[in-house]
Structure formats: C-alpha cells, structure tokens
Image (spheres, rainbow, N blue to C red):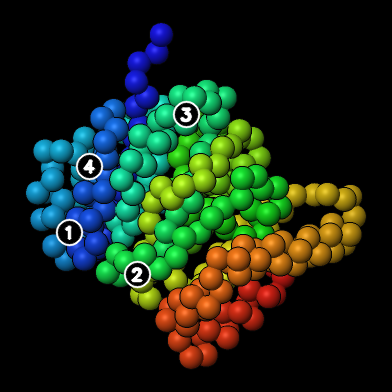
Amino acid sequence: MTGPLLISIVTPSYNQVAFVEETLRSVLEQDHPHKEYFVIDGGSDDGSVDVIRRYADRLTSWVSEPDRGQSHAINKGFALAHGEVLGWVNSDDTYLPGALATVARCFAEHPEVDFLYGDYLYTNPRGETLMRRRLFDSMSYETLLYHDYFGQPAVFFRRALLDRVGPVDEQLHYHMDWDLFLRMWKVCRPLHVPIPLATSRLVPTAKSNAQDSERYLAGTMLVQQRHMNQRFASPLLNRWWHRGYYYCSFAVRAWAVVRENPIRYIRILRDLFPERRFFRLWRTRLRSPF
C-alpha cells in the first residue's frame, strides 16, 4: 500500500516583489498537506528576498543567487524535489484554493494518468479575475502544436514523465513550458480537470505579453518547427497539410473564445496591446508558421 501522494512545487522568481507574496501564500495555504515547496530566486534586488525570507520556515528550501534564467531555475527546483507529482508556478501567478488536493485526488483515482491539466483564470495586475479559459477534454498533437493552449500553472505531471522526456530546455527564453508539454504530449496519458486550478496574471510588462515582438515570434516559430511532425513523405505536401490544419485549428480556438465572452476578450487584448500593437498581434496570429 502506497502512502499519500507527495506533490513538489517550484517557483522561479526574479524581481517580482509586487506579486511574489501572493504566489507564496497561494501554495503554502493549500489544504493538501503532503507537499514540498521550493523557491528559486535569481538574485533579486527589489525586496523580493525579504518577502521570501519571511516565509522561509514554511518552505522546503529556497535560494537567491544568480542563475541562467527561468528555465535553469525550474530545473534547479525539480532537481531538489522528491515528489511523485511535479508542477511550477511563476512568481506572478497563483494556485486557487483546493487545487493541490484536487490534483492529488485525480492522480490517485487515475494511476494510469501521468499528465494533468486544468482550466485557469486570467487576472489583472490587482489579482481580479478577467475571464476563465476552458480547455478541451482532449486535444490532438497538432492542436497543441499550433496553439499553446495550456495555462502553465494549471499543469501537473508525474516525475517519471519528466524523466522520460528530459528537463526544461534552458536555451529557450520564451515557450520553455510549451516545448516541454509538446515533448510530453507525444508520450503522455493525459487527463483534463474541468475546473480552474490556477490564475495567470496578465501584466503589460510581463515577458508572456510580448506576443507581437520579433523575439517572441521567433521563439514561437522555433518551437513549432522543432516539433512539426511528418504526416507525409513529401516535405511540400506535409507543409501544406499543416498549413490547412493550422487555420482549421485557429477557427476552433476562436470559437472557444467567442462562446465565452468575445467582447471582454477583445477588451483585454486592447489593454495589453494598445494602439498599433493590437492589429500587429492579430496579423501575426493569422499568419501560418508553416
């Protein structure tokens, strides 16, 4: 008979004093008692370390030292972890109450599952809910290849799955989570939990909200080209197949947004991408990477 499921959570952080305490509390106040929590700070100089130190006696481990970026920090945390199930939450996102208990119960009830993903909430810088993102119960590999659907803090996986596909790619500045999840999606046995497990904060200055920048777009194309699967022997036919499937998938994604609240979604994007950036964003989204 196995014991209670141990869940290990990592928070990579760097100069997030405005949000890091809310993140810490969202993990520490989870009602699942069998958890480890590692905070890997990259040497913040904005007061974040003072906040982390106040919670040090409740953390499994923490460190504040220069590192090679977010991906390196996540890998450092996972290397320290002992849990059967792993996840990470960035220092501007949060877990919702009861999230880890739900995750533990689902993994225990479905021992064959090694990748679990839930719905999530977009919040503004003040932590107020903007909208809920409902994910599909099942997705083809191509669906995930074309669009990064997952809310990263609402994803959890077994250690054995991470060991099978390898660590987070430390060469990636953007989309390191998407790259990891694509590698996992090829071999995993997933389960969708149709309730919100986490929040993803939308901050205009955040790295994740540079979706119209050349560097972000280059990162997107790098991941998609790296993971593009071969459906046909002919490279030309394969590319055209992916291009057609991409636009079909885009229509499905648009419907998923429209059925919720399209006006609110557009307003959120206009706030994040003002003036010309809004139209540049849509031009890039409508352009197939294949």
Look at 56% across and 37% down and name the residue there. Answer: 191
- Figure quadrant of the N terminus: top left
Which circle's residue, 1 or 4, is located before the other in the chain?
4
Contact, mark 4 vs mark 3 (Cβ under 8 Å):
no
Question: Badge 1 is on which residue?
Answer: 48
Task: Tell me which amino acid carries mark 3.
Answer: Phe
Q: Is residue 68 left or right of residue 170?
A: left
Residue 124: numbered disc: 2
Question: Badge 4 is on which residue?
Answer: 28
Of badges 3 and 1, the one in the foreground is: 3
Position in image of residue 286 (x %, y %): 68, 75
Which circle's residue, 3 or 1, is located before the other in the chain?
1
Mark 4: secondary structure: helix
Of badges 1 and 4, the one in the foreground is: 4
Question: Badge 3 is on which residue?
Answer: 107
Contact, mark 3 vs mark 2 (Cβ under 8 Å):
no
- From this viewpoint, is residue 110 visible? yes
Corner quadrant of residue 280: bottom right
When the figure is inspected, residue 106 is found, relative to residue 269, above or below; the finding is above
Task: Tell me which amino acid carries mark 1.
Answer: Ser
Crowding near the residue tagged with mark 1, few <14, some 14–19, many ≥20 C-alpha atoms within 10 Å: many
Look at 42% across and 59% down and name the residue there. Answer: 121
- From this viewpoint, is residue 66 visible? no
Position in image of residue 141 (x %, y %): 69, 48
Which circle's residue, 4 or 2, is located before the other in the chain?
4
Of badges 2 and 1, the one in the foreground is: 2
Which circle's residue, 4 or 3, is located before the other in the chain?
4
Look at 45% across and 54% down and name the residue there. Answer: 120
